[in-house]
Amino acid sequence: MRSQENAIEVNDITKKFRIYFDKGALLKEKVIFRNRNKYEERWVLNGISFDVKKGEAIGLIGHNGCGKSTTLKLLTRIMFPDSGSIDMCGRVSSLLELGAGFHPDMSGRDNIYINASIFGLSKKEIDNRLQDIIDFSELAEFIDNPVRTYSSGMYMRLAFSVAINVNADILLIDEILAVGDANFQNKCFNKMLEIKKKGTTIVLVSHALGQIEQICERTIWIHEGLIRMDGSPREVHNAYLEFMEDKRRQTLVEQERRQEQQESPSQEESGGEGEEAQEESQQPQKAAEKPVAQRRGSGEARMKHIKSYNRQGEEKYHFKSGEDIIFEITYETYERIEQAIFGLSIFRIDGTRCYGSNTRVDQVKEFVIEKDGKARVCFDHNKLLPGRYFVDVCIARGMDMIVDYLDTVNEFEITGITEEMGFMKMSHSWEVEGGDHVI
């Protein structure tokens, strides 16, 4: 029997899918090519249970394919579990897939009525909320156009606007806050906080741990179809990030081992080539390297690795806001480079440059590089707000010659709990005169 305190009760649910190797589409193909109908059963959920109290906001995290989105679809009853039970209390609104339920040939206005009615609103209720939905979506100019003419961002605006204006008791969201331009993302995020304040129960699936920490009181980590951890966002996220970091290191070690095997032929394969082969092996193996990002430059030097560390020298790609971040550039030099300059820029995941500088701007004494080495730059007490970021790095000769430039590398994430907006903290203070309160 469901507890009166709970909005959602999930009891030992399991779910499996059939993965066909090569399923025939036509009856003729199914009869003639029977071997094509072979499949394997893949268990996505292996028996998970959890409760969500009324007014509580929880986040579901885990690597791709762990069962997060499947769990959310089971909660919306788009699909049903193979075993176990799910009990929900109240009106449910969901944002699972971009534009799901939209008819492409109908106008945005007509689709508002269709979607809102699916969520259980009467025509009179939709009439009363129609203008609020259109205003929030900022699509008044296009609201009577067929939605097939909408961009993906416009789809998201309309879908989100409908979902948050049905006064649902339970709101289910799957990565939808990651879509759209930065301004609308902030608007949606603030609306989520407002909805939460009104007492709506929220279940949020997201890879943006910073968003979960700002919205949710609880995080559930799903791993290989089971709940691996359930607790406070800070505690669960730290454990999850450590796990993913270890997994990433193992992958890198395996990739480097395979690359070394490919770049180091056996004696039998290389024998007999003598000094000529030895000289070639000393040249930069540009063709054999697997490109990790777009690069350009004259090529007298080449950056091999860009890594990030904390003050304890631990390689990390997840940092807390306020934590020191050290970026290390490992490079190879093929020719002497005078008036050398190292530069690094930090970008938000949407491409907005947050900060950029170089050794000349920072008035580092002019130097020459003529052998392999490393360059480090430390950001003390980083002021970045929670979110995902990446860096561009470069080596230059003077201010007008790019030797090597790598963009979109070393993705990292900043975590923390804050209601500040933007991408960087700024020191400030308030003074208010007049009124009934003194700050």
Image: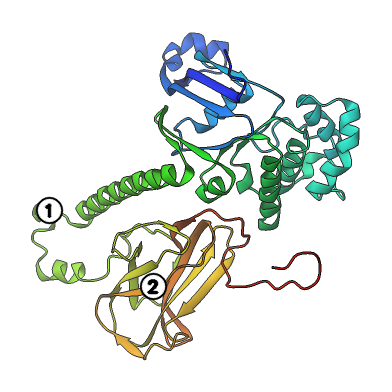
Q: Decide: is 142 above or below 331.
A: above
Question: Badge 2: few (under 14), some or many (20 or more) residues near its Cα, within 10 Å?
Answer: some
Quadrant of the snapshot with the C terminus? bottom right
Q: Decide: is 368 above or below 50.
A: below
The residue closer to the viewer here, 167 or 330, is 167
Which residue is denoted by mark 1 in the rendering? 266
The residue closer to the viewer here, 93 or 152, is 93
Q: Position of residue 138 (x, y in %)?
A: 81, 50
Residue found 53% across the figure and 26% down from its top: 51
Q: Which mark is residue 378?
A: 2
Q: Quadrant of residue 39?
A: top left
Residue found 63% across the figure and 46% down from its top: 177
Q: Position of residue 427 (x, y in %)?
A: 58, 72
Quadrant of the snapshot with the N terminus? top right
Q: Decide: is 118 above or below 279.
A: above
Residue 21 visible: no
Q: Position of residue 234 (x, y in %)?
A: 45, 47
Residue found 53% across the figure and 47% down from its top: 213
Secondary-structure class at tag 1: loop
Q: Earlier in the sequence, mark 1 or mark 2?
A: 1
Residue 106 visible: yes
The residue closer to the viewer here, 400 or 310, is 310
Secondary-structure class at tag 2: strand
Q: Is residue 392 left or right of residue 371?
A: right
Question: Badge 1: few (under 14), some or many (20 or more) residues near its Cα, within 10 Å?
Answer: few
Q: Residue flagged by tag 2: what amino acid is it?
A: Cys
Q: Position of residue 120 (x, y in %)?
A: 78, 24
